Image (spheres, helix red, strand yellow):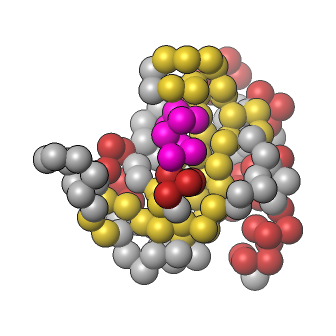
């Protein structure tokens, strides 16, 4: 799971890539072809804008390995290519808090586990999120 503003998540979806931890190699090096990635977006913009608190985009990694791109002067982030499900619907996290292994025993402190650029999710959590985003059949067909 990546954590990014909804605006940044959509930029990755539209470009067909995932970039985590401000482009750090260590953040994406564990992603493999066939892995699913979902983004949680706390806000619309980076540290600003409307509160979102939803899983906003989801897809399957298609790169064999991370690669580096020149994005701006002196900024060359690492990325992986992702086939995002364009028909996925954003899924608010609040209804899922008590179901997700990631958050279910944390009560009002659930936001603490959503900090940082990425989190590894259990497959059952990815399945719940894929279902909430209305892409469960695609998730299950590509997992088998």
- Asked if residue 19 shows in the view, the reply is yes
**Quadrant of the rendered image containing residue 30:** bottom left
Q: Residue at x 42, y 36 (%)?
A: 116
Q: Which residues are magenta?
A: 4-11
Check the image and report above or below for 134 versus 109: below
**Quadrant of the rendered image containing residue 122:** bottom right
Q: Is residue 110 left or right of residue 65?
A: right
Check the image and report above or below for 77 versus 92: below
Q: Position of residue 1 (x, y in %)?
A: 56, 50
| Residue 86 is one of the magenta-drawn residues | no
Q: Position of residue 46 (x, y in %)?
A: 45, 26
Q: Where the C terminus falls, by quadrant?
A: bottom right
99 or 45: nearer the viewer:
45
105 or 82: nearer the viewer:
82
Magenta stretch, overall SS: helix
Q: Residue at x 47, y 32 (%)?
A: 115
Q: Is residue 69 left or right of residue 101?
A: left
Q: Residue at x 80, y 77 (%)?
A: 141
Q: Position of residue 72 (x, y in %)?
A: 23, 47
Q: Position of residue 7 (x, y in %)?
A: 54, 35
Check the image and report above or below for 3 versus 77: above
- Asked if residue 98 shows in the view, the reply is no
| Residue 8 is one of the magenta-drawn residues | yes
Q: Residue at x 42, y 66 (%)?
A: 80
């Amino acid at each position: 799971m990546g954590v990014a503003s909804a605006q940044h998540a959509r930029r990755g979806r539209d470009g067909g890539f995932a970039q985590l931890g401000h482009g750090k190699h260590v953040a994406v090096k564990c992603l493999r072809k066939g892995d699913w990635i979902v983004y949680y977006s706390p806000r619309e913009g980076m540290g600003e804008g409307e509160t979102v608190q939803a899983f906003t985009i989801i897809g399957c990694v298609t790169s064999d390995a991370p690669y580096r791109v020149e994005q701006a002067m002196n900024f060359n982030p690492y990325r992986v290519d992702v086939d995002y499900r364009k028909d996925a619907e954003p899924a608010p996290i609040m209804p899922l808090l008590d179901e997700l292994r990631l958050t279910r025993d944390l009560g009002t402190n659930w936001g603490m586990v959503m900090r940082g650029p990425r989190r590894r999710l259990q497959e059952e959590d990815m399945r719940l999120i894929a279902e909430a985003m209305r892409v469960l059949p695609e998730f299950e067909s590509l997992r088998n």
